[in-house]
Image: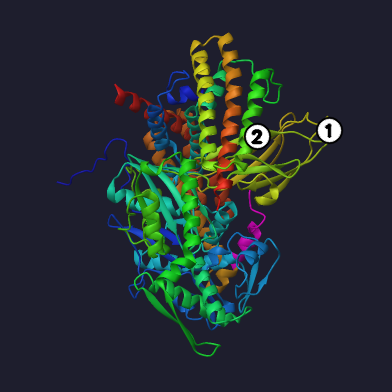
C-alpha cells in the first residue's frame, strides 16, 4: 500500500493539505500508541509501527519536495544518485554566485538588508523552478517526469542554500 | 421483576472498572502528584493539606527523608541532602561539574556513572529521583485508597534520550508502571485545552527551576499537535538564584571557595529574595551562618538587571522555535505560562512584549503540569474510552550517527512527530572491513564532539568486500515516550545487531535490579513476592484486553484462529495461579505471540473504518 492509498487520496502532485491533515489526524486517532496504553503488548507494538508509518506518510506527502521525490519513485522514474555529476553548467555557475552572495553577508554594512535581499532572490528562483516541476509532474508522462526530476534536484540545491542562510542568520543574531 | 442489563453495541459487556492512575510532575525544585477524582483533575495533598513537595532527599543515619523534612537539613547537612537532582540525572560527571561548579556534594563513580557520597553510601541521581517518586506514589495510594495501575510522569520537552531513560529507570526502581513519559509543556496544554476548548496555535512558555521549554502547538478538535519545541535543559529559576548569589558575594566581598553551609545559605537567601521581589520593590538579604552578621538591600531594578540576560536567552529560544514551527508571532492566539519561575514579573512583561499578548496564567503555574498529566493518565489507563484527546508530540533534538571525519549524519531531524522509524544506509571505508562501529549521537551540531553521545555498539561479521560495497542499514526507532532503539544490519548477509539505546550514561538492567532489591530490603518487602504479583497482574491485564478484543472483533478471525487464542488464554489463566514467575512470563509471551495476526487485522480494520468515516463526512 503506498502513502496515497494509505490516506485514500489520488496520487497527484497537487494535494489538498487541509484534507491531508484531517485524514492524518483521523488515522492517528485510531492507531496512536496512546489508544493502546492498556492493551496487550502485541497491540502496543503494532500500534507503534502503524503510527510511525502514518507519521512518515504524512511527513512525505506534506512537504512538496519530498512528495515530488516520492511520486517520481512510484512512477519508476530513472533517478541518478544524488552524487552523480550535474551537467547543467549554467545552473552550477548560478549556485556559485549565490554561495558567494551568502558568504559576503557577514562583511556587509547592512546585514538585515542583505539577508532580506538574498532571501527574496532565493524565493523567486525557487518558485520559477517549482512551477516548472509542478506542471511537468501534472503531465504524468515518463519524459516529463525525467525533466521534473532535474528540476527537483535543482530545487534541493535551493533548499540547502535556504537552510544555510537561516544558520547564518542565527549565528549573526546569536547575541 | 429484575431488569437484565444489555450493553451498548460495540462496547465491552464487562462493567467498566475504574483504574487508579496518577500524573506526576517530577520537578527540579518541587514535585506534585495529581489524579482525576469524580471527573475532575486535582493535585493530591498530604495530611497537612499541602500538595507541593520540595524535590529534596536527605540521607540521614536513621533513614531517608523526602520533601519538607529533607529540606530542613539543606543548610546544616548539605553534603547528605540532595536538592535539584533533576539537574544531575542522565548527565556525565564532567558535564555536571562544569555546569554546576559549586555543588556541595562529594562526587564518586566513573565519568559516565556519577554517584554522590552520602551517609548511606554511594547514591546515583536516579535513586534520588526514585525516592521522590516513591514518596509521591505513597501519597497517591493513600489519597485514592488503592494501588495505582500506572502513572504518567512529565519531563521537560528538551530532555535528551539519556535524561528520559534515566527518569524511566527511576520509576522502575520506585516500582511504578509508567504509562507514558509526557512532555511538560504538552501536559500544560492539555490542562488548559480542556478548560477553554480553543482551536488554533498556542505557545507554552515553561520556565521551571532548572529547565526552560518553549513549545508551539496546534489545537484542533481534541488533537494537540506539537509543531516544534525548543529550549534549554540547563536554564531555569535556579540560574536567577545563581545570578543573585554572585551579586551578594560581590557586595559582601566574600571569596570562593566558600563552605558548603555558606553556599546553601546564599542560595536560600537568593531564592527568598527572588520570590519576595515578585511582590515587593526591594528586599533585605541577611547572612548569619558562618560569617559576621551582614545585610544588604536588593531592589527590583537591580534584580531585573541581573536576570535580563537569562530572560533574553529564553526569548531567543522562542524566536527559533517559532521559526522551526513555521509560525509567526501574530498567528499565536494564546501564550500559556508554566513553571514557578514565570511568577517573576520581568519574565511576564518580556513574554507579553515578545508575543504581543497577555499570557494566560489562570491555572496555577506550579500545578498545571501535574493536572495535565493526571488527565492524560486517566485516559491512558482506559478510564475514558470515548475521549477525543490525542497528543502528537515530537522529538526535541536530532538523532544521528558518527561518520568518517568525526561528523554527524542526521537520521531523524528534531521536531519529527513520534513515534517514528527511519533507516539510513551506510557503507564500509576500507577494503575487507568486517566490523563497523556504530556511534549514536543526539544534537544539532555537525561535529561529534559537540553532540551528546548516546551509545556505541559494533556490527561484526560483515563479509569482506571492497570498500563501499557493503550496505549497512541502520534503523532508528523512537517510541511514544521519546525513547530510542537502534539496530543495524548488513543487507546482503542479514547479519544483525540490535540494541535498545541505553545511553552510555545510563544504568544497565543488572544495576537497576540491584537497586530495586536494595530498596526492597530497606522497606522489608520481598522482591520475589513483588515480581510474582506484577506478573499475575500483567497476566490478568493481557487476558482481559484480549477477551475484550475478541468480543469486539472476533469476526476478523477464523474458527481455528479463535480456538488457538482461547487455548492460550486458558493456559495462561491456569499458570497465573501458580507461583513460578518465569512460567507466567513465558505464558504471557505465548498468548501475545498467538494474537499477533489478530492485532494487525484489528488495526487495519480500524484504519479502514476511520477512512470511510472521513469520506462519508465529506459527501
Quadrant assignment, res B349: bottom left
Residue B512 among magenta residues: yes
Seen from the viewer's position, the closer of residues B608 and B469 is: B469
Q: Is residue B116 above or below residue B484?
A: below
Q: Which contiguous range is marked in magenta?
A: B500-517
- Residue B385 quadrant: top left
Q: Chain for mark 2?
A: B
Residue B509 in view of the camera: yes
- Residue B135's x, y, as percent? 46, 69
Where residue B30 sits, quadrant-wise, is bottom left
Q: What's the image's color scheme? A: rainbow
Residue at 47% of width from left, 85% of height from top? Answer: B295
Q: Residues within 10 Å of mark 1 (few under 14, many from 20)?
A: some
Viewer-nearest residue: B90 or B444: B444
| Mark 1 or mark 2, whichever is nearer to me | 2
Element type at marker 1?
Answer: loop
Label 1 to label 2, Cα distance in Å?
21 Å
**Could you say which disc has been placed on residue B424 in the image?**
2
Amino acid at each position: 500500500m503506498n502513502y496515497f492509498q494509505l490516506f485514500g487520496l489520488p496520487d497527484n502532485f497537487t494535494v489538498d493539505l487541509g484534507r491531508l491533515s484531517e485524514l492524518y489526524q483521523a488515522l492517528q486517532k485510531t492507531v496512536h500508541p496512546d489508544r493502546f496504553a492498556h492493551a496487550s503488548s502485541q497491540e502496543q507494538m503494532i500500534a507503534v509501527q502503524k503510527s510511525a508509518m502514518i507519521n512518515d506518510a504524512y511527513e512525505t506527502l506534506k512537504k512538496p519536495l519530498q512528495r515530488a521525490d516520492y511520486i517520481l519513485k512510484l512512477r519508476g522514474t530513472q533517478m541518478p544518485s544524488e552524487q552523480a555529476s550535474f551537467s547543467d553548467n549554467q545552473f552550477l555557475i548560478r549556485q556559485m554566485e549565490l554561495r558567494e552572495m551568502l558568504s559576503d553577508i557577514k562583511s556587509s554594512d547592512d546585514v538585515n538588508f542583505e539577508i532580506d535581499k538574498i532571501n527574496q532572490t532565493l524565493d523567486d528562483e525557487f518558485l520559477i523552478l517549482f512551477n516548472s516541476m509542478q506542471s511537468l509532474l501534472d503531465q504524468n508522462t515518463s519524459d516529463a517526469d525525467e525533466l521534473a526530476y532535474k528540476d527537483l534536484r535543482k530545487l534541493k540545491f535551493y533548499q540547502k542554500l535556504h537552510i544555510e542562510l537561516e544558520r547564518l542568520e542565527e549565528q549573526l543574531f546569536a547575541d | 421483576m429484575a431488569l437484565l442489563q444489555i450493553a451498548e453495541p460495540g462496547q465491552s459487556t464487562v462493567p467498566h472498572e475504574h483504574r487508579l492512575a496518577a500524573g506526576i510532575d517530577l520537578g527540579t525544585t518541587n514535585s506534585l502528584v495529581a489524579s482525576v477524582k469524580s471527573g475532575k483533575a486535582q493535585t493530591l495533598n498530604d495530611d497537612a493539606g499541602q500538595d507541593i513537595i520540595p524535590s529534596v532527599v536527605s540521607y540521614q543515619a536513621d533513614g531517608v527523608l523526602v520533601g519538607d523534612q529533607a529540606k530542613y537539613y539543606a543548610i546544616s547537612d548539605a553534603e547528605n541532602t540532595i536538592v535539584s537532582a533533576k539537574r544531575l540525572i542522565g548527565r556525565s560527571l564532567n558535564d555536571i561539574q562544569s555546569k554546576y561548579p559549586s555543588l556541595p556534594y562529594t562526587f564518586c563513580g566513573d565519568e559516565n556513572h556519577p554517584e554522590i557520597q552520602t551517609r548511606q553510601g554511594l547514591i546515583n541521581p536516579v535513586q534520588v529521583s526514585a525516592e521522590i517518586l516513591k514518596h509521591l506514589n505513597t501519597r497517591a495510594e493513600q489519597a485514592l485508597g488503592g494501588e495505582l495501575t500506572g502513572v504518567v510522569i512529565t519531563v521537560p520537552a528538551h530532555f535528551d534520550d539519556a535524561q528520559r531513560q534515566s527518569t524511566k529507570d527511576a520509576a522502575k526502581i520506585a516500582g511504578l508502571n509508567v504509562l507514558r513519559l509526557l512532555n511538560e509543556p504538552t501536559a500544560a496544554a492539555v490542562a488548559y485545552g480542556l478548560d477553554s476548548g480553543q482551536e488554533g496555535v498556542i505557545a507554552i512558555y515553561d520556565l521551571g527551576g532548572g529547565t526552560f521549554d518553549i513549545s508551539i502547538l496546534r489545537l484542533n478538535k481534541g488533537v494537540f499537535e506539537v509543531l516544534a519545541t525548543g529550549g534549554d535543559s540547563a536554564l531555569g529559576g535556579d540560574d536567577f538564584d545563581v545570578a543573585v548569589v554572585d551579586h551578594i558575594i560581590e557586595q559582601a566581598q566574600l571569596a570562593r571557595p566558600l563552605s558548603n553551609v555558606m553556599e546553601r545559605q546564599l542560595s536560600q537567601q537568593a531564592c527568598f529574595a527572588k520570590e519576595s521581589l515578585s511582590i515587593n520593590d526591594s528586599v533585605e538579604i541577611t547572612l548569619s551562618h558562618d560569617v559576621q552578621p551582614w545585610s544588604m538591600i536588593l531592589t527590583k531594578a537591580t534584580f531585573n538587571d541581573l536576570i535580563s540576560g537569562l530572560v533574553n536567552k529564553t526569548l531567543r529560544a522562542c524566536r527559533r522555535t517559532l521559526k522551526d514551527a513555521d509560525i509567526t508571532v501574530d498567528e499565536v492566539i494564546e501564550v500559556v505560562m508554566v513553571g514557578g519561575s514565570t511568577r517573576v514579573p520581568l519574565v511576564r512583561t518580556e513574554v507579553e512584549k515578545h508575543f504581543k499578548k497577555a499570557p494566560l496564567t489562570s491555572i496555577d503555574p506550579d500545578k498545571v503540569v501535574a493536572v495535565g498529566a493526571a488527565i492524560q493518565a486517566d485516559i491512558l489507563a482506559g478510564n475514558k474510552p470515548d475521549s477525543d484527546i490525542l497528543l502528537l508530540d515530537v522529538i526535541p533534538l536530532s538523532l544521528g550517527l558518527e561518520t568518517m571525519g568525526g561528523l554527524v549524519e542526521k537520521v531523524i531531524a528534531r521536531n519529527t512527530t513520534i513515534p517514528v522509524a527511519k533507516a539510513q544506509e551506510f557503507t564500509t571505508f576500507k577494503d575487507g572491513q568486517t566490523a563497523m562501529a556504530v556511534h549514536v549521537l543526539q544534537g544539532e551540531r555537525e561535529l561529534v564532539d559537540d553532540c551528546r553521545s548516546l551509545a556505541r555498539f559494533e556490527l561484526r561479521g560483515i563479509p569482506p568486500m571492497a570498500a563501499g560495497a557493503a550496505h549497512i542499514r541502520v534503523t532508528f526507532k523512537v517510541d511514544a515516550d521519546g525513547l530510542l532503539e537502534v539496530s543495524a544490519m548488513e543487507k546482503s548477509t542479514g547479519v544483525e545487531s540490535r540494541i535498545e539505546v541505553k545511553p552510555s550514561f545510563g544504568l544497565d538492567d543488572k544495576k537497576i535490579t540491584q537497586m530495586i532489591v536494595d530498596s526492597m530490603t530497606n522497606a522489608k518487602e520481598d522482591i520475589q513476592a513483588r515480581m510474582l504479583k506484577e506478573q499475575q497482574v500483567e497476566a490478568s491485564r493481557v487476558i482481559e484486553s484480549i477477551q475484550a478484543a475478541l468480543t469486539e472483533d472476533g469476526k476478523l478471525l477464523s474458527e481455528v484462529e479463535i480456538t488457538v487464542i482461547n487455548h492460550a488464554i486458558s493456559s495462561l489463566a491456569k499458570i497465573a495461579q501458580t507461583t513460578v514467575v518465569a512460567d507466567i512470563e513465558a505464558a504471557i509471551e505465548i498468548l501475545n505471540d498467538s494474537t499477533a495476526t489478530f492485532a494487525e487485522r484489528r488495526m487495519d480494520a480500524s484504519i479502514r473504518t476511520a477512512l470511510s468515516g472521513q469520506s462519508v463526512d465529506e459527501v
